[in-house]
């Protein structure tokens, strides 16, 4: 495996990581961890 | 020059990642966040050794801090420990993964930059993180013991890592069976000595737990409260498979909620499955044992999240002494996280074995930066969630005020709640720093308030004096007579807290000192003398310390005598 196939694989992997990371950073600023199976537990407002 | 660069690449990579996570922590001041509390000068008090208070939950962690913080300022100690923890985690996982950089760098990143490390850092569980960092090292030491018969480093690392009970248990469980198990070169006497040494080195936490007059079983509600949680769209199972699922939403990263993070977990675990066989061929005993522990821990973590409310699980935690160690199930995924970090690079190596070298290197590099892409908000202290602050000057004045008083007596911390929010700490929630700040024993409310489905639940504390005070406050009784009976002479009221309603009736006490945010009150009249002592615990602590020093000296001497036989990596 090499040449064009390798370049395509590398490009796809690189793009997925870059786009995913950007999405993660945006999510970290806009979303709070949401309960999925159970409610989250937080410290009392003390 | 080229070879020298390669030799230090793993260390440089780990240092770089550690700095990327902890950069904000390194600015002057203290990180005061949830359970993470450091103070300028912590004094050695009986409760640091597990004497006279509740169950020894942070023993001997606080005793070690008290001893080390003498020559080292508290904030410098905090920064050093955190930085060293992350660097050791990365280098250790890398060395355990193999000898080439294409194995080492991804393994270091996967272990150092994990959801597990993130959640425990954000929870402030630095003692557990310290054991997490030493886990690959203790397995490397056990591997060496299997080959050479020299077991001293195994015991030393188990002892150094046992700052908290969970840390001591996880290191011992990982290392001792591996070092003395089938096929080991350790002699019969050596096996017994290693086992005995590890037991003695862990005695500083288990002995006071056994000798504690308070209950040695834990509140079963804790299993429900501290059970693993789903922190992403993959549910509880995929959350814990990815090292996440910690019970506290304040310790979870926002990126964990994305499908991309879940996709990342699936990809990395798949790679680990592909590489498992290759890793096992290189180090069968280590990989098999880590797999047994990893899968067991993973199953328990998952069960804690989905079966925490069931009777059988609660009876396990409530009826077995020490069962409380199991109730925060997510922390037992630690072995799984290391297994995945070590095997996934082998998976990439296997998939790219027929590829041209540049593509193989690129894919290994991609795996090395993948954790950063999946959890980008761990960078910069959780994107600013960990910040430093300085204690106000009046805290030092309060400490001095109480330190110079020649009379005996303990201190009560009010408002009657375990956690605090300070404007000077950016209103971050933090465990009350007062018990560590003062040079006298502070009685505080050790019941943990949490909200479950919008309702306030308190997980039971275990300090009898705190329980008595809770009862008096709930019944609206005047505190002064009870405090006198309990040997508590002073009351510190932190007036800058959001719930002053938790301050009880303080008739029979008088204010003797006041500065911004702090009032010191004194119980008028005589108080009962109370000086908790336990000569057995102190003697065994000293024995454990002496044993650690002797074993460390022996390990160094032995290593110097046979430098050529020291392996530099694991698989």
Image (cartoon, grey):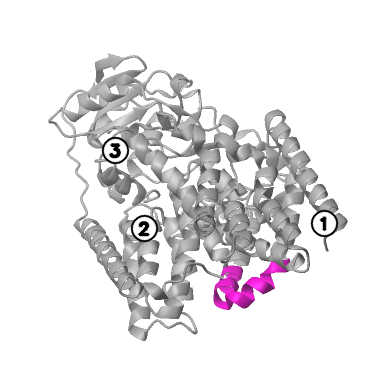
Check if residue B288 falls in the magenta segment. yes
SS at mark 3 in the image? loop
Q: CA distance from mark 1 to mark 2?
A: 46 Å
Q: Residues within 10 Å of mark 3 (few under 14, many from 20)?
A: many
SS at mark 2 in the image? helix
SS at mark 1 in the image? helix
Q: Name the one closer to the observer, B549 or B176.
A: B549
- Tag on residue A6? 1
- Tag on residue B160? 2
- Tag on residue B367? none
Q: Quadrant of the C terminus of chain B?
A: bottom right
Left or right placement of residue B26 versus residue B201 in this view: right
Q: CA distance from mark 3 to mark 2?
A: 20 Å
Q: Chain of mark 2?
A: B
Residues drawn in magenta? B274-292
Picture coordinates of residue B109, whole percent (x, y): 60, 51
Q: Residue at x 56, y 30 (%)?
A: B384
Can you name the residue that lies furthest to the left here? B406
Q: Which residue is mark 3?
A: B42
Q: CA distance from mark 3 to mark 1?
A: 57 Å
Q: Residue at x 60, y 55 (%)?
A: B105
Q: Name the one closer to the observer, B367 or B166.
A: B367
């Amino acid at each position: 495996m090499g040449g064009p196939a390798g370049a395509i694989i590398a490009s796809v992997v690189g793009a997925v990581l870059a786009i995913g990371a950007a999405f993660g950073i945006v999510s970290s600023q806009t979303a709070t961890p949401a309960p999925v199976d159970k409610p989250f537990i937080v410290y009392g407002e003390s | 020059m080229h070879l020298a660069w390669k030799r230090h690449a793993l260390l440089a990579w780990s240092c770089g990642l550690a700095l990327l996570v902890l950069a904000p922590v390194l600015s002057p001041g203290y990180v005061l966040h949830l359970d993470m509390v450091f103070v300028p000068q912590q004094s050695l008090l009986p409760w640091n050794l597990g004497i006279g208070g509740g169950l020894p939950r942070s023993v001997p962690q606080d005793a070690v801090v008290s001893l080390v913080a003498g020559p080292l300022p508290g904030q410098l100690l905090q920064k050093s420990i955190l930085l060293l923890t992350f660097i050791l985690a990365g280098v250790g996982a890398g060395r355990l993964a193999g000898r080439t950089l294409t194995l080492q760098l991804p393994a270091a990143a996967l272990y150092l930059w994990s959801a597990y490390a993130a959640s425990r850092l954000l929870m402030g569980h630095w003692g557990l993180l310290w054991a997490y960092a030493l886990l690959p090292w203790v397995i490397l030491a056990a591997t060496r013991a299997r080959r050479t018969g020299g077991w001293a480093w195994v015991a030393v690392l188990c002892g150094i890592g046992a700052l908290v009970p969970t840390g001591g248990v996880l290191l011992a469980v990982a290392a001792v069976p591996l070092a003395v198990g089938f096929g080991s070169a350790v002699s019969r006497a050596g096996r017994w000595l290693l086992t005995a040494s590890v037991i003695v080195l862990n005695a500083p936490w288990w002995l006071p737990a056994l000798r504690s007059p308070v209950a040695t079983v834990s509140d079963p509600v804790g299993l429900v409260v501290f059970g693993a949680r789903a922190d992403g769209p993959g549910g509880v199972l995929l959350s814990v498979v990815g090292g996440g699922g910690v019970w506290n939403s304040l310790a979870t990263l926002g990126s964990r909620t994305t499908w991309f993070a879940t996709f990342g977990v699936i990809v990395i675990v798949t790679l680990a499955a592909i590489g498992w066989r290759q890793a096992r061929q290189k180090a069968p005993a280590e990989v098999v044992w880590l797999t047994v522990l990893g899968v067991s821990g993973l199953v328990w973590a998952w069960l804690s999240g989905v079966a925490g409310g069931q009777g059988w699980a609660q009876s396990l935690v409530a009826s077995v002494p020490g069962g409380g160690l199991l109730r925060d199930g997510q922390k037992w995924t630690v072995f799984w996280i290391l297994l995945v970090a070590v095997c996934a690079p082998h998976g990439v190596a296997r998939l790219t074995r027929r590829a041209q070298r540049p593509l193989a290197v690129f894919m290994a590099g991609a795996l090395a930066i993948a954790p950063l892409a999946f959890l980008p908000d761990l960078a910069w202290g959780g994107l600013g969630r960990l910040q430093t602050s300085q204690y106000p000057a009046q805290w030092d004045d309060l400490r001095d005020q109480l330190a110079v008083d020649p009379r005996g007596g303990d201190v009560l911390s009010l408002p009657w709640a375990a956690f605090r929010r300070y404007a000077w700490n950016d209103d971050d929630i933090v465990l009350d720093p007062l018990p560590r700040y003062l040079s006298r024993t502070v009685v505080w409310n050790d019941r943990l308030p949490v909200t479950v489905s919008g309702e306030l639940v308190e997980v039971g504390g275990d300090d009898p004096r705190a329980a008595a005070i809770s009862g008096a406050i709930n019944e609206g009784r005047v505190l002064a007579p009870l405090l006198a009976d309990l040997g508590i002479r002073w009351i510190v009221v932190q007036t800058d807290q959001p719930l002053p309603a938790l301050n009880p009736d303080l008739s029979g006490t008088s204010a003797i000192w006041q500065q911004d945010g702090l009032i010191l009150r004194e119980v008028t009249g005589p108080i009962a003398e109370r000086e908790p002592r336990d000569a057995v615990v102190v003697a065994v602590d000293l024995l454990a310390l002496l044993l650690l020093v002797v074993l460390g000296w022996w390990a160094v001497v032995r290593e110097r005598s046979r430098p050529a036989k020291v392996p530099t990596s694991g698989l």
